[in-house]
Amino acid sequence: MPSARPATTRPQRVLLVGGGHAHVEVLRRFALRPDPQVTLTLVSPEPSMCYSGMLPGLVAGHYSPQDTHIGLAPLALWAGARYVADAVANLDLYAKTAQLASGEYLAFDLLSLDVGADPDLRVPGAQALALPVKPVSGFLLGWARLQAEALTGGVRAIAVVGGGAGGVEMLLAMHHRLATIMRAETPRFALVTDQPALMPQFPPIVRARFGRVLVERGAVLHLASGVTAVEPGTLVVTHGRRIAVDRIVWATGAAPAAWPAASGLACDGRGFVLIDDTLRSTSHPFVFATGDCAAQLDHPRPKAGVFAVRQGPPLAANLRRAAHGLALKRHVPQRHALALVSTGDRHAIAVRGPFVAEGDWVWRWKDRIDRAFMAKYALPEVPDAKEAKTG
Ligand SMILES: Cc1cc2nc3c(=O)[nH]c(=O)nc-3n(C[C@H](O)[C@H](O)[C@H](O)COP(=O)(O)OP(=O)(O)OC[C@H]3O[C@@H](n4cnc5c(N)ncnc54)[C@H](O)[C@@H]3O)c2cc1C
């Protein structure tokens, strides 16, 4: 790549914060095409990334952790990046340093945030009593404990809070797993949402279909029931109604971390980092952001892993271009992403705009797509000459 910077300029320190779906692709692309003008550091508190498309399948028992996780330390090693097992707690955008939870400071020339967003637990009692679906590592530990307790008869009723695709798919996955191992003793499930309908971002036919599947599995639907408090053994919802539960899984919409907005980065009204079509902060040109933690000013999209995955290649290209002082390229996300939502068993529904299809074949199609994604990150990989040219 021709460089607009004089050849004597020192390499640019690129700090990747978060081992999310876009950053794993950045690492892969720099592994395939190393760049002496770039030194990479990855900071992530989690040692691996769980591929979001396969998380429900992991919970349902269709996949193993090895099938669904990408090891970040080996990926960083392959890319020649330093891996720091820590979390960023603060940014100083004047000094261009990130302070880690351990207190260490890391200096950077270019910063890229792909830190995701966790469910919003700001309901009284939720933090202490509910199991959030993110961070994934914490959720998987809690899920293992929940299964063990259910097997000993200690869990009779499970509520999932959140009626979006994530909550519905997670409920069906958990139900499938427990029904497989417990049969007639399977706990009862409830789905609790503040919205008047399930999966509001999906066409009515899809919402109705998932509603029927949930009822067939014995789940009770509590629509228009915003949770106002969580108490031991009870969810308190709109109008003071109380729902008795033994365990609560929290799968509500994502809430951003506070530190990006606190650092002075321009954010939207909810606190997600505002980016332009080059994936760069609208306020700080040396900062990039992708995935759930970002909001693309001119092309807002729902929070979904598929968008973060698609941002990986243009992010890698633009970090490289920025390090060389070259003009950045635009990335406009697709308007209608393909959503493949499983029903817990090996069956799924495909939705893209107005197009809807359903069947076991859809699950097998999804399985092939997901396994092909994961195969790209299997190490060691022989560099692909074609990708290496375009990366
Ligand atoms: C149950 C469920 C099912 C879903 N299913 C699908 C699906 O089928 N398809 C789909 O497209 N989307 C799905 N989603 C949404 C999807 O999970 C997210 O959109 C996706 O994970 C976002 O990717 P990301 O790269 O932004 O962040 P993530 O993949 O969440 O990664 C962020 C990483 O940053 C790290 N991090 C966080 N804070 C810090 C910090 N301070 N410093 C350093 N690192 C930090 C985290 O540890 C994490 O490893 C689902 C979500 C849920 C909850």
Image (cartoon, rainbow, N blue to C red):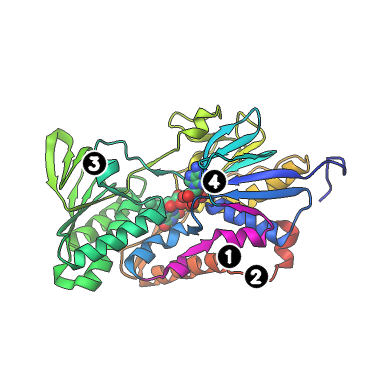
Label 3 environment density (alpha carbons within 10 Å; few <14, some 14–19, many ≥20): few
Q: CA distance from mark 3 to mark 2?
A: 48 Å
Q: Taking the image as drawn, is residue 115 in sight?
A: no
Which residue is disc 3 drawn over? Answer: 196
Residue 114's disc number: 4
Q: Nearer the viewer, residue 44 or 295?
A: 44
Local crowd size for mark 4, using a 10 Å CA cut-off: few (<14), some (14–19), many (≥20): many
Q: CA distance from mark 4 to mark 1?
A: 18 Å
Q: Secondary structure at mark 2?
A: loop
Q: Position of residue 42 (x, y in %)?
A: 60, 50
- The three-letter amino acid code for the residue at tag 3 is Pro
In the image, 386 versus 115, the foreground residue is 115
- Characterize the local packing of mark 2: few (<14), some (14-19) or many (20 or more) Cα atoms within 10 angstroms: few
Question: Disc 4 or disc 3, which is closer to the eye?
Answer: 4
Q: On the image, numbered disc 1 is attached to which residue?
A: 377
Amino acid carrying label 4: it is Asp
Q: Secondary structure at mark 4?
A: loop
Asked if ligand 1 lies within 8 A of label 2, the reply is: no
- Label 1 sits on a secondary structure element that is loop
* First-in-chain label (3 vs 2): 3
Please, what is the three-letter code of the amino acid marked with disc 2?
Glu
Q: Residue at the location (51% across, 57% down)? A: 47
Q: Which residue is mark 2?
A: 381
Q: Amino acid at mark 1?
A: Tyr
- Of the numbered discs 4 and 3, the one sitting upstream in the chain is 4
Q: Does the magenta segment cover residue 64?
A: yes
Residue at disc 3, secondary structure: loop
Q: Which residues are magenta?
A: 62-84
